[in-house]
Amino acid sequence: MIETIRLFDDDSHQTLFEGCVLSCEQDGDLYKVTLNQTMFFPEEGGQSCDKGTLNDIPVEKVLEKDRVIYHWVKEPLWEGDTVTGSVDWEKRFSDMQQHTGEHIVSGLIHEHFKLNNVGFHLGSEAVTMDFDGVITREQLRMIEYRANEAVARNLPVKITWPSKEELMEIPYRSKKEIDGPIRIVEIPGYDICACCAPHVHNTGEIGMIRLIGMEKYKGGVRIQMLCGFRALADALEKERNVYDISAQLSAKPYEVAAAVEKLKAESLALKQEMNGLKMDILQEKIALLPGDSQNVCFFDKHMDKSNLRYAFNLLSEKCSGLCGCFDGDDEKGYRYVLGGKNVDVVAAGKALNEALEGRGGGSKEMFQGSLQASKVQIEEYFAKV
């Protein structure tokens, strides 16, 4: 198979081109097409492929194997015909903004902290970059600031094809061994890297670099990044949310974090107060039960796990046999805590689950689980044991 001429290597900003169809074969519901030359960048190195059309037929995916680029389309094209290709500029430019921004960030992290970029993914959302070591949040902010300085300087993004001899003198980054000619992308003062993807002509085209997240990953860190119009869209969406929260909390935009902390503290205080009231009510309800009860089941649909155990402890003091506390209703089912002073608790719990389609487990002091039975069925069961 004849190698495909990669037009994007020479001019990343060109979107229209003509190519001769070398082959077209059906592949499932699609047709796999090769051309003598193409402007479509294939899915490669963690980056998704270009989108666009061939003779106005949408290109569904683009892959490369052995220097041959394959295009998948929904309609057949005829061998020997000349077709017109059109690359989706909006996606291409966005991808170039992200990828060139990644070079700057990776170059800076390598320069300052000697960490290597060992993973990269560029899709439709945030770019992810994996590094083989850890940096702090403060260091991340410093890298972000320096990266945007590179944008402001509007530096040229240089593309070269050095000879093997010249490569020996170039301290370039590369994630993998490369066979054949090596394409070097250089951003003077920031990065020199082997890379096959399209990039912007000058760093000013990137627009903005935002490092929006970082997490520990495989002994190192994974950093999330947005550049250019993606970064702008993210900033505008976050701004909209901040102003909405600001209006709802009657706080200035730059004070919303403090207002939320205050709201959380108030909510916690109310939750604690409500929990105390629940316990008081449970205590009063259980106090009204007969003191000489043998087997007792107690229901309340407003208990959480801590209330459920609290009610059970109160109930077990009044119950000489099997006692159970149940939280829930007939529609959603019931959670329960089961026990008894003179009862084989584990055996009793297993028997309850078997009889009423329940599940759970426990020890000789307490058995916990859930049931899908009705309240009437549970009461009837306790009346019989």
Image (cartoon, rainbow, N blue to C red):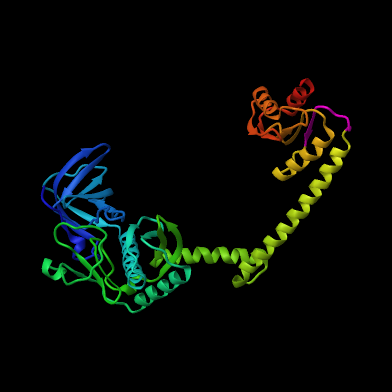
Q: Nearer the viewer, residue 274 or 67?
A: 274
**Which of the 4 image quarters holds residue 112?**
bottom left
What residue sits 15% from the left and 67% below the top? 161
Q: Is residue 6 magenta?
A: no
Q: Is residue 173 left or right of residue 283?
A: left
What residue sits 75% from the left and 56% below the top? 270
Q: Is residue 376 left or right of residue 291?
A: left
Magenta stretch, residue numbers: 290-299
- Vertical placement of 250 versus 334: above or below? below
- Vertical placement of 167 versus 49: above or below? below
- Vertical placement of 293 versus 308: above or below? above
Figure quadrant of the C terminus: top right
What residue sits 65% from the left and 64% below the top? 261
**Which of the 4 image quarters holds residue 26?**
top left
Q: Nearer the viewer, residue 371 or 136?
A: 136
Q: Is the magenta region chiefly helix, strand or loop?
A: loop
- Vertical placement of 309 versus 359: above or below? below
Q: Nearer the viewer, residue 62 or 84?
A: 62
* The furthest residue to the bottom: 153
Q: In this view of the protein, can residue 333 be seen by the observer? A: no
Q: Position of residue 47 (x, y in %)?
A: 31, 56
Q: Position of residue 346 (x, y in %)?
A: 67, 29
**Which of the 4 image quarters holds residue 284?**
top right
Q: Is residue 357 left or right of residue 79?
A: right
Q: Position of residue 358 (x, y in %)?
A: 64, 28
Q: Is residue 147 left or right of residue 299?
A: left
Q: Position of residue 336 (x, y in %)?
A: 70, 35
